[in-house]
Amino acid sequence: MSTSSNTHARMPGFIDLGVPAPLVETLGRQGITEPFPIQSATLGDSLAGRDVLGRGRTGSGKTVAFALPVVARLAEPRRSRTPGQPRALVLVPTRELATQVLATLTPLAKAMRLGTLAIVGGVRQNPQVEGLRRGVEIVVATPGRLEDLMRQGHVDLSAIEVTVLDEADHMCDLGFLPPVRRILDATPARSQRLLFSATIDKSVD
């Protein structure tokens, strides 16, 4: 029985790109079964531990594109939580975006038994300090509040294995470039860096 010559070659799925099965199953329960272009383009490198610069607007699937390698990276080898020392950092320009990113990231992290925490301004810091004290693997943060807690000694970035800069162009527009640089300087120089931006202009570069 011959196959039609018009059959299209199947595009690589999440499993083909190296995403761990529990994460693929979690995405499937959310109705996400096929990678978006930005995910197909970046996951091979990001899951391999390479630094990645991705250009993608809101709605392009970039949050999943960086959430998957962050969670996969921390899941193996599993380590005990250290109070005040997260292992991954996602920097975002606004509290609203932090909430959106956390909503995508948390179900994936839970599938691998990893904890997440938002560190943002405009709300009381005590619950965030308590969360850090209990120990958490992944922090989603705005630069201002994160620097405040670093100065107060509540958070130490020396154990960070992967840092994500999300909406880097918006971060630059809001004047966050100096604190972002200081925060990156506080993470290990050899740690993985993932940067996502709608535009790659001079300030982002």
Image: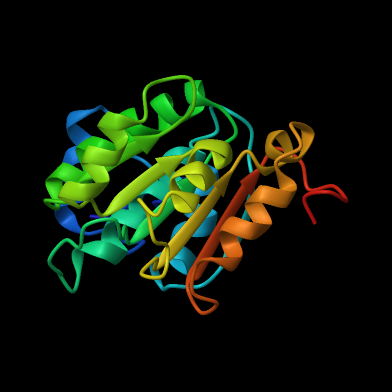
* 73 shown above or below 111: below
In the picture, measured across the screen, residue 129 lies left or right of residue 42, that is left
Picture coordinates of residue 168, whole percent (x, y)? 67, 43
Q: Nearer the viewer, residue 4 or 170?
A: 170
Indicate left or right for 88 with 174 as reference. left
Residue 35 appears in view:
no
| Residue farthest front in this picture | 152
- Left or right, 175 with respect to 195, comes to right
- The residue nearer to you, when weighing 30 against 76, is 76
Q: Quadrant of residue 160?
A: bottom left
Total marks shown come to 0
Residue found 41% across the figure and 25% down from its top: 100
Name of the residue lying farthest toward the right = 202
Where in the figure is residue 152, as x and y percent of width and height? 43, 49
- The image's colour scheme reads rainbow
Residue 55 % position (x, y): 67, 46
Q: Position of residue 147 (x, y in %)?
A: 53, 47
User: Viewed as shown, does residue 34 lie left or right of 168?
Assistant: left
Displayed quadrant of residue 149: top left
Q: Is residue 58 above or below residue 204?
A: above
- Quadrant location of the N terminus? bottom left
Q: Considering depth in this image, is 122 or 140 the residue closer to the camera?
A: 122
